[in-house]
Image (spheres, helix red, strand yellow):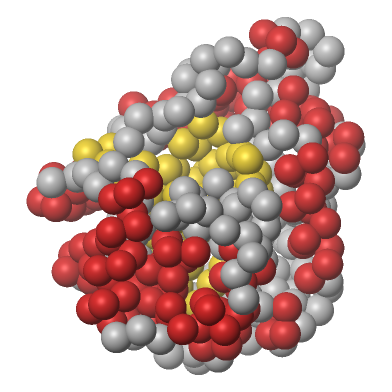
Amino acid sequence: MTCRSDWTKKEIRAIHDRPLLDLIYQAASVHRENHSATQVQVCSLISIKTGGCPEDCKYCPQSARYQTNVTATALMKEEEIVDMAKQAIAKGATRVCLGAAWRSVRDSAQFDLVLCAIRQITDMGVEVCCTLGMLTDFQAVRLKEAGLYAYNHNLDTSPEFYASITTTRRYEDRLKTLDVVEKAGISVCCGGIIGMGESVDDRVGLIHMLARRTPHPESVPINILIPVQGTPLQERQPVPIWDMIRVIATARITMPKAMVRLSAGRLERSLEEQALCFLAGANSIFSGEKLLTRPNPDFDEDENMLRLFGLTPRPTFTPIARNKFTQLKCEFVSCDL
């Protein structure tokens, strides 16, 4: 199946609404045409700066606007970030993601610290991804020069439903950040959340926005909302696993080369439910005790699950030949902050 970027909403809705078993079968077939059916990439997400975010995303316990059980913390020290990355890599992670609860990146000593941490983790031979908020062109270039492999910036939902979830940032701002990342030559990691009260049309609209990008995002994380006490969405009921499977399968069919990642909400799903997600085209998980601030299956639990399913961790595919700048370990940026 060739990659297309001219999908219509009508076509995507028709895929999404197929009889469930037919949909899973087609998605599994597309998956096997484009990926190893026995490999799953294990990622680890480290919250390097937690809480205190000025934005009002209704799903997020890190917003300073809501009274949740999340305590705002300062940016971690460089050695703490690198040490946590080492621990995750030792347990099998081949992609390390660094997340900071910032609205946007500021040119500061804190950003310099993050750049130094990226260099060190990249030199361990794994993919490094960051989610730090909005970026300028120059900041994206600096991240690329530091060796950053991918940048996560989720669209969350459709353009039509977005204002019901976030009012402190426009949908266009998110799209602009994706363009900035692509322009700098960094892989795009972009997905969304289901279970926030959106319609099926909104889920189709999200996939439509992603599948029409050229190229498609390298990585598409699919999250199930975890309602958190104190947030406006605290009373939302969990969506059925069939909704998740339909979204995963539709993403796999419309973006055949992308890594489709099972992200937030996996802890609440049974092994049988997760097996169906893998069958429908998911080929990556986030492992470790926490996913930013929410509980998540730990590495040992996931190792047992993958073994049960006959799946093996996918090796990293960070290019061996790196940008010449990445060899200059912090020559232009002091790491002693």
Q: Residue reaching furthest front?
A: 2
From the viewer's perspective, tell me whether residue 176 is left or right of residue 251. Answer: right
Residue lying at 72% horizontally and 34% vertically, measured from the top left: 185
Front one among 337 and 219: 219
From the viewer's perspective, tell me whether residue 270 is left or right of residue 96. Answer: left
Q: Position of residue 243 (x, y in %)?
A: 38, 82
* Quarter that holds the C terminus: top right
Look at the image and tell me whether residue 94 can be seen. yes
The quarter of the picture where residue 261 lies is: bottom left
Tally of numbered tags: 0
Front one among 207 and 294: 207
Q: Position of residue 28 (x, y in %)?
A: 28, 61
Residue lying at 37% horizontally and 46% vertically, measured from the top left: 34
Residue lying at 34% horizontally and 44% vertically, measured from the top left: 35
Q: Position of residue 325 (x, y in %)?
A: 74, 13
From the viewer's perspective, tell me whether residue 63 is left or right of residue 29. Answer: right
Q: Is residue 315 above or below residue 273?
A: above
From the viewer's perspective, tell me whether residue 136 is left or right of residue 309. Answer: right
Q: Is residue 138 above or below residue 19?
A: above
Q: Is residue 249 above or below residue 105?
A: below
* Quarter that holds the N terminus: bottom left
The quarter of the picture where residue 115 lies is: top right
Q: Position of residue 14 (x, y in %)?
A: 46, 84
Look at the image and tell me whether residue 84 can be seen. no
Q: Is residue 331 above or below residue 112?
A: above
Residue lying at 68% horizontally and 52% vertically, measured from the top left: 214
